[in-house]
Image (tube, grey):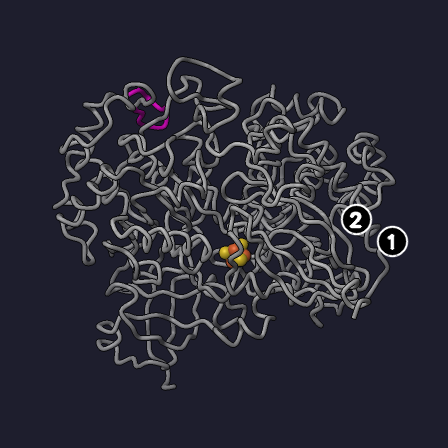
């Protein structure tokens, strides 16, 4: 017994299956994981976990894990096992020959919000500093680029001002375009708890579909897809007409802006702009079940509560007007002063565990360098080059290819080699069959680093097996500016390796093949370090100490030693160990709640601004009109299709589809149809139904219920099966501001094919 107890240990880390960032402990006995539990004193989740969180550890010892490098020269050939040495040589040879022949922009890295910060940072350093290309992208482009655009244009700085602590203080929740109950279940539990304990707390849900989230709402605003900009402008109009805006807050902190050039506007011009959005007019535009009185009611709740928190996710971001929709939510908060105080925040939710920490903060998108630095600013590029000890001017001035342009370039044959890390664009890109033609071509060499085979590895030349979570060490940064460390607890299976080791060893070979000492310089600080702890720690130290100093995401106080001591990590900014050990900054910009504000006093106002906010130090209220989605129903394709998430699965199901408990709960995708539409089309529950757009077709069983409004169908996007992969059907048009595609809306036909 004593011996067994000695061999059993609980290792602290972060859940990996959504952006909430729940703290967990992995139980390991004799080197084998056996359970996962929540950490009770962690402010992210207070010990609670959802179904996905409880089960994800079962991926660790799964029989399908990739354990050896696999290679094939041509995509029609079978894969063969090869050594790591050979695999890295081949990867270096193919990338360097593409660079020699066509320049750095002929290659690209496509990463993920699931990669550790250290991994994203190192890959982008090699690409930018080494291969002289900003072709560094990641799947967060598909889910939160519009939120970045919204924060940048409204507040001048990315990521929320507040965080989860506001949920327990809020008196009104405005949840729009988010099925929080299923996509962020542990946060939803906190919202429910707040409402159950305080029945006067209002929950507003604005969504075209009845969901588990709308079921607790005091008011569910069910509207026609793509009309919510009208709704948000109408709420602003009610607030102004009824004088519910906060004059003092506006006078101190806000200005009004319009157009591409961000021309100044006045309060009166804003009032005139929203004048046509009367509740009556908006209710007509929105359709569904919304009435003018509903709009008045929710605007009053929003404005007059002691604290309002808005939460949104893909329903707002994955839109042709995603940035505008984000701006309009921020507008309501700025107008009413529902910001920068306890219980009030404009809180965009994130889907992946490290979309914020790795990709947004550490340089994982084509237009952003580490530390929230825009690529196009020479001074910013030079700061990065100096930190890396490489010649000034090495990083190109032009942003790289964003996701849709990258895979278009693969189709055209102008990008010759792509490294795809821990994501599956073959399933997750909109209109995916179009882009899979390029991936299938032998003109583009594809490396996939992953733990399982996916739809994308079907197009790979080289598949490299990677260590999974808890099999390697590194940091995740969740939705609320919080960085948390997970240390290696168990050995990865077979020959699987951490990506930081893979990237370093690949870069050394690239340096030799291209005879370029600057590439070698990019990884020199990490030479010889063991991969389990010293290597990721050195990468984290370089990033935080050299590249977050003076930036809003200052993490210099959050060393591995400090993160290791904290139950739930550190919220940035945390420039010193002292701040970090207090947990960092609960509220950006807010004196008293923001430890930075005391030391960085900028003016005498009760709120302080810190970081690269707008130069005028103001919050910007935007004049943004209602605009049509990229595709709306017509006579040929008479239904709206919207896609989304369910509680049992995550992303492309490569993990949750392999966990029996989760698969049993929800084995395959279906199409939700409103009973009135089903009756008109003669569709009964369980019938097989064709869902066809101008781009592709799915064959799905019907689920008939009052979820979607009439004229709309809904399909969850996780299913990998070819006939149920809904991204064959979705449209690849995107927001010109954020380049995020409009997954949420397209037009389809529905046809019954056969009975159950
Ligand atoms: Fe994991 Fe998200 Fe569930 Fe928390 S809510 S346990 S982070 S999947």
In-front residue for pair 148/599: 599
Q: Which image quarter: residue 713?
A: bottom left
Q: Is residue 257 magenta?
A: yes
Left or right: 662 in relation to 102: left
Residue corresponding to mark 2: 532
Residue corresponding to mark 1: 85
Disc 2 on helix, strand or loop? loop
Mark 1 Cα shell of 10 Å, populated few (<14), some (14-19), many (≥20)? few
The part of the chain drawn in magenta is 256-264
Circle 2 or circle 1, nearest the eye: 2
Q: Is residue 444 magenta?
A: no
Query: How far across and down, in percent of the image, does residue 100 sit?
Result: 77, 39
Query: How far across and down, in percent of the image, does residue 76 sit?
Result: 71, 67
Disc 1 on helix, strand or loop? helix
Please give the label number shown on residue 341: none
- Real-space Cα distance between discs 2 and 1? 19 Å
Q: Which image quarter: residue 638?
A: bottom left
Q: Tell me if residue 421 comes above or below residue 590 in the rendering.
A: below
* Quadrant location, the C terminus: bottom left
**Furthest residue to the top?**
603
Query: How far across and down, in percent of the image, does residue 698 sit?
Result: 44, 71
Mark 2 Cα shell of 10 Å, populated few (<14), some (14-19), many (≥20)? many
Q: Name the residue located 61 percent from the left edge and 26 percent from the top edge.
A: 575
Left or right: 385 in relation to 310: right
In-front residue for pair 463/525: 525
Whether the residues at callouts 2 and 1 have beta carbons within 8 Å, the answer is no
Q: Name the residue located 52 percent from the left edge and 61 percent from the top edge.
A: 650
Query: How far across and down, in percent of the image, does residue 134 sit?
Result: 63, 35
Q: Is residue 228 visible?
A: yes
């Amino acid at each position: 017994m004593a011996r067994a107890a000695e061999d059993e240990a609980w290792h602290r880390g972060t859940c990996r299956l959504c952006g909430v960032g729940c703290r967990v402990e992995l139980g390991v006995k004799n080197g084998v994981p056996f359970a996962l539990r929540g950490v009770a004193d962690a402010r992210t989740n207070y010990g609670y976990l959802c179904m996905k969180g409880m089960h994800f550890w079962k991926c660790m010892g799964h029989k399908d894990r990739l354990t050896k490098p696999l290679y094939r020269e041509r995509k029609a050939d079978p894969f063969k096992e090869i050594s790591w040495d050979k695999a890295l040589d081949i990867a270096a040879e193919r990338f360097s020959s593409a660079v020699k022949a066509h320049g750095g922009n002929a290659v690209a890295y496509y990463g993920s919000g699931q990669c550790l910060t250290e991994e994203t940072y190192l890959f982008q350093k090699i690409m930018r500093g080494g291969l002289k290309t900003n072709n560094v992208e990641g799947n967060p482009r598909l889910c939160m680029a519009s939120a970045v655009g919204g924060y940048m244009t409204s507040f001048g700085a990315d990521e929320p001002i507040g965080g989860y602590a506001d949920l327990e203080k809020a008196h009104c929740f405005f949840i729009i375009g988010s099925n929080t109950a299923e996509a962020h279940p542990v946060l939803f539990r906190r919202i429910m708890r707040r409402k159950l304990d305080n029945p006067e707390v209002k929950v507003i849900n604005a969504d075209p579909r009845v969901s588990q989230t709308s079921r607790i709402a005091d008011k569910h605003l069910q509207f026609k897809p793509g009309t919510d900009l009208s709704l948000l402008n109408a709420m602003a109009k009610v607030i102004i007409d009824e004088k519910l805006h906060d004059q003092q807050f506006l006078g101190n902190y806000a200005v009004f802006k319009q157009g591409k050039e961000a021309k100044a506007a006045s309060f009166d011009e804003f009032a005139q702009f929203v004048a046509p959005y009367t509740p009556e007019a908006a209710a007509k535009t929105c359709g569904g079940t919304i009435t003018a009185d509903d709009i008045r009611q929710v605007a009053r709740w929003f404005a007059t509560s002691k604290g309002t928190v808005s939460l949104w996710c893909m329903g707002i971001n994955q839109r042709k007007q995603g940035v505008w929709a984000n701006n309009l939510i921020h507008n309501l908060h700025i107008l009413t002063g529902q910001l920068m105080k306890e219980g009030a925040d404009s809180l965009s939710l994130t889907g992946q565990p490290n979309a914020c920490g790795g990709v947004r903060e550490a340089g994982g998108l084509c237009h952003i360098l580490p530390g929230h630095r825009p690529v196009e600013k020479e001074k910013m590029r030079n700061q990065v080059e100096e930190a890396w000890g490489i010649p000034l001017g090495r990083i190109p001035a032009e942003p790289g290819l964003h996701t849709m342009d990258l895979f278009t370039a693969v189709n055209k044959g102008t990008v010759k080699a792509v490294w795809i890390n821990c994501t599956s664009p073959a399933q997750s890109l909109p209109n995916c069959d179009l882009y899979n033609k390029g991936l299938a071509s032998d003109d583009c060499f594809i490396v996939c680093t992953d733990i399982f085979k996916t739809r994308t590895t079907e197009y790979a030349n080289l598949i490299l097996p990677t260590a999974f979570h808890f099999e390697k060490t590194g940091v995740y940064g969740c939705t609320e500016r919080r960085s948390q460390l997970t240390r290696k607890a168990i050995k990865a299976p077979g020959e699987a390796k951490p990506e930081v080791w893979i990237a370093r060893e690949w870069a050394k070979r690239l340096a030799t093949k291209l005879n370029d000492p600057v590439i070698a310089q990019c990884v020199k600080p990490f030479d010889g370090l063991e991969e389990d702890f010293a290597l990721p720690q050195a990468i984290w130290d370089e990033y935080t100490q050299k590249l977050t100093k003076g930036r809003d995401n200052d993490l210099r106080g959050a060393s591995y030693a400090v993160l290791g001591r904290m139950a739930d990590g550190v919220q940035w900014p945390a420039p010193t160990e002292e701040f970090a050990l207090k947990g960092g900054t609960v509220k950006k910009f807010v004196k008293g709640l923001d430890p930075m504000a005391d030391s960085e006093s900028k003016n005498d106002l009760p709120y302080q601004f810190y970081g690269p906010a707008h130069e005028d130090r103001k919050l910007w209220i935007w004049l943004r009109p209602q605009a049509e989605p990229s595709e709306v129903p017509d006579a040929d394709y008479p239904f709206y299709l919207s896609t989304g998430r369910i509680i049992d699965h995550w992303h492309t199901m490569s993990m949750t589809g392999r966990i029996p408990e989760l698969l049993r709960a929800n084995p395959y995708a279906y199409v939700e149809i409103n009973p009135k539409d089903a009756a008109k089309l003669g569709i009964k529950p369980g019938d097989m139904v064709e869902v066809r757009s101008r781009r592709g077709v799915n064959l799905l069983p019907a689920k008939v219920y009052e979820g979607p409004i009439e004229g709309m169908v809904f399909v969850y996007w996780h299913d990998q099966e070819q006939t149920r992969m809904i991204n064959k059907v979705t449209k690849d048009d995107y927001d010109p501001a954020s380049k995020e595609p409009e997954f949420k809306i397209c037009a389809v036909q529905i046809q019954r094919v056969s009975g159950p």
